Image (cartoon, grey):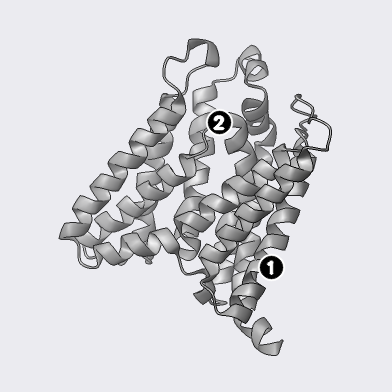
Amino acid sequence: MSDLVLIMAAPFVACLLLVAMFSYLGIHIIAREVIFVDLSLAQLAALGSTCALLFGVAPGSTLGHVFALAATTMGALIFALTRTSRARRRVPQEAIIGVVFVVSSAAAILVAERAPTGAELIKDALVGSILWVDWPTIPRLAAVLFAVGLFHWWLRRRFFTISLNEDEATRLGWHIKWWDFWFYGSFGVAITVAVPIAGVLLVFTFLVIPAVMAFLYTRRPPVLLAVSWTTAVVVCAAGLVISFEWDLPTGPLIVCLFGLALIVAGIVSRWSPMPERTGGNIQ
């Protein structure tokens, strides 16, 4: 037990921080029906980090993060500008997100061919290294995610209304594309620090699956957050323990456990009342 605590304590704290951020963001992503925006922004961050190698910049350095953040900010601008109301929408925004993902993926491969250790960087971005997180990394991760969380708390009414009740935001005369840019831009900041630690697969899992499980039961923002956070923490703890006891890859195992948890939640939801369709009381 002491070995388990010693080895898994820092990864578990990192999981808690990432779950707190991304299970919250996942509620917005599910409500907006832009499920793969995380993959797209993560791939843009990987492209930025790969481009940094061409200039001799280490991907984990401060300047390397600046390259990655610049790329995700560009993606935030694209997603904000291509947003249209449902009544006027000719092309689903998910299609735009898919185009950005595939083009940035191809560009990253081309750049990696010219950049030293580029191929290794792309592989690391996919799987991450959550098991090898050390304690000095935790305060830096916490500081960035806390800043993003504080920003979202400050603008919670705007973001939740646009995500859960777009018609109301339009009626109020809000400049939705402007607020979308700030939403996706802050999302990109979280992605930039999370992907090198957890990898694209695990971050995408934290973002989508807890929120999907929550939406099976409710549409009320406070309950959505509670269900997302609780289920994610339990699954992460189980994944870390099983990974240690059975000597299995941590990230892929946690992803698979989340998939199993979603199946169980889906079966249980068949016997529960349909969730209310209102956005809830947003303060």
Q: Quadrant of residue 167?
A: top right
Question: In this image, 141 relative to 199: left or right?
Answer: right
Q: Residue furthest bottom?
A: 2
- Is residue 263 in sight in this rendering? yes
How many other residues sit within 10 Å of disc 1, few (<14), some (14-19) or many (≥20)? Answer: some
In space, the residues marked 1 and 2 are separated at their CA atoms by 29 Å
Between 74 and 201, the one nearer to me in the picture:
201
Q: Residue furthest left?
A: 114
Q: Which residue is mark 2?
A: 33
The residue that appears at 48% across and 11% down in the rendered structure is 88
Q: Which residue is mark 1?
A: 237
Please count the marks in the image: 2
Residue 234, compared with residue 262, is above or below; it is below
Residue 203, x across and y down, in percent: 52, 54
Between 165 and 241, the one nearer to me in the picture:
241
Ranked by sequence position, the earlier of labels 1 and 2 is 2
Q: Quadrant of residue 33?
A: top right
The residue that appears at 22% across and 58% down in the rendered structure is 112
Residue 177, x across and y down, in percent: 49, 24
In the rendered image, the quadrant that contains the C terminus is top right
In the rendered image, the quadrant that contains the N terminus is bottom right
Between 47 and 151, the one nearer to me in the picture:
47
Q: Describe the element under mark 2 as helix, strand or loop.
A: loop
Question: In this image, 237 relative to 89: left or right?
Answer: right
The residue that appears at 68% across and 82% down in the rendered structure is 5
Q: Describe the element under mark 1 as helix, strand or loop.
A: helix
